[in-house]
Amino acid sequence: MVEKIGVIGGGSWGTALAILLSKKGYEVELWVRNSKQCNDMNISRENVKYLSGVVIPNNVRIIDDLEKAVTDKDIIVLSIPSHGVRETLLNSKNYIKPDQIIVNVAKGIENNSLMRISEVVKEIIPKSKYAILSGPSHAEEVARDMPTTVVTASEDKKIANYTQDIFMSPKFRVYTNPDVIGVELGGSLKNVIALGAGISDGLGYGDNTKAALMTRGIIEMSRLGSKMGANNETFAGLSGIGDLIVTCTSMHSRNRRAGILIGEGNSLEEATKSVGMVVEGVKTAKSAYNLAIKYNVTMPITKEIYGVLYEGKDVKNSVVNLMLRDKKHEMEDVVKILNNSW
Ligand SMILES: NC(=O)C1=CN([C@@H]2O[C@H](COP(=O)(O)OP(=O)(O)OC[C@H]3O[C@@H](n4cnc5c(N)ncnc54)[C@H](O)[C@@H]3O)[C@@H](O)[C@H]2O)C=CC1
Ligand SMILES: O=C(CO)COP(=O)(O)O
């Protein structure tokens, strides 16, 4: 049986995944919200704005009709920015049936509700079959067939295994993990740390500083995850440290690039405008900051990034604040986290 797949969201990631899935022989429809962009993509067979230089195969049907894109699909891939997921699901829920599998690839946490995407999906389509696909996977490289590894998580093992089979290819290796909370949090929270890594680069700091941000960053991500019910080991995997590494070090990273611009003295608005694609870490910084308060978890890096983005804090003062915190035993938190006694 040929699987029918609707990829909802024609940004860089949706386009790259539509190409990957179409090469596997599935029937793929790619929904692009903007009609002009949809038309342009049909003419040029390229997503010039979000993924230039990559040919979109003719067997990917590019459409702007959301109803058609979700109707009768075996799988619906949600590849829109996290802040657009709720609205898009509300607009399409009447056409989605409970036996269709929803694979979310967005990495973010809602600002007002502080909900993860699985929770948003469950609220709007209560009986849906849900999986998340996440990990170190820049669209620019996946679309060019560069070896990439990711993880899919679902509460239902059968759905995780099915999603693994659907996406797996010789250049795209998919692992499974039952920990939906951990995989969702890892992919979302790493974007906040990546903004920090970019800011550090923009300030002219070096590899030592970035290594510090990444190492202490994964610790505070795990700390929050632990309180929210994630499995701590997940943060040592592809959706945790793996994605943190790629996002903090790659020039493809939208979050890191925005951070660099902020570190160089640009405003948040100037930075996001210049990147021109979704910088999920900006909104997630607000959600993570509020989750840290809600769960009474210490997240110093996230707190400083929030201060820079939303309270007009000077980035240099933030570095000073982080460096001059109270003295600590390095492994204290780690042992507690690993023992699940945090
Ligand atoms: N680009 C990448 O390499 C990867 C991105 N992701 C995640 O995938 C999600 C999508 O990211 P990208 O494709 O990079 O974004 P993008 O910035 O390349 O494109 C976003 C797309 O979503 C559309 N859009 C924007 N706001 C919308 C809304 N409110 N409702 C419906 N559609 C809307 C835009 O028109 C555009 O087509 C994000 O959560 C991102 O973190 C995950 C892995 C890799
Ligand atoms: O999550 C991503 C790659 O795994 C994409 O986000 P960035 O572009 O910020 O790295």
Image: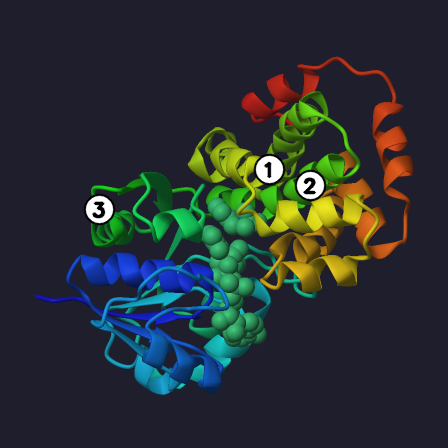
Give the residue at mark 1. Answer: 248
Relative side of 318 to 236, left or right: right
Query: Front-most of 87 and 20?
Result: 20
State yes or no: Cβ of the residue under disc 3 lies below 8 Å from any atom of ligand 1: no
Residue 163 picture location, percent across and down: 27, 53
The relative height of residue 227 versus residue 55 in the rendered view (above or below) is: above
Q: Which mark is residue 15?
A: none
Helix, strand, or loop for circle 1?
helix
Give the residue at mark 3. Answer: 169
Query: Front-most of 199 and 230?
Result: 199
Label 2 with label 1: CB-CB less than 8 Å: yes
Query: Front-most of 290 and 324?
Result: 324
* Residue in view at x 44 percent, y 64 percent: 79
The kind of residue on which mark 2 rests is Gly
State yes or no: Cβ of the residue under disc 1 lies below 8 Å from any atom of ligand 2: no
* Residue in view at x 47 percent, y 76 percent: 89
Report which quarter residue 339 is drawn in: top right
* Residue in view at x 37 percent, y 69 percent: 46
Q: Report the Cα–Cα distance between label 1 and label 3.
A: 26 Å
Relative side of 267 to 337, left or right: right
Query: Front-most of 197 and 75?
Result: 197
Q: Report the Cα–Cα distance between label 3 and label 2.
A: 32 Å
The kind of residue on which mark 1 rests is Cys
Helix, strand, or loop for circle 2?
helix
* Residue in view at x 23 percent, y 51 percent: 158
Q: Earlier in the sequence, mark 2 or mark 1?
A: 2
Give the residue at mark 2. Answer: 198
Residue 236 picture location, percent across and down: 49, 28
Q: Report the Cα–Cα distance between label 2 and label 1.
A: 7 Å
Residue 44 picture location, percent across and down: 35, 75
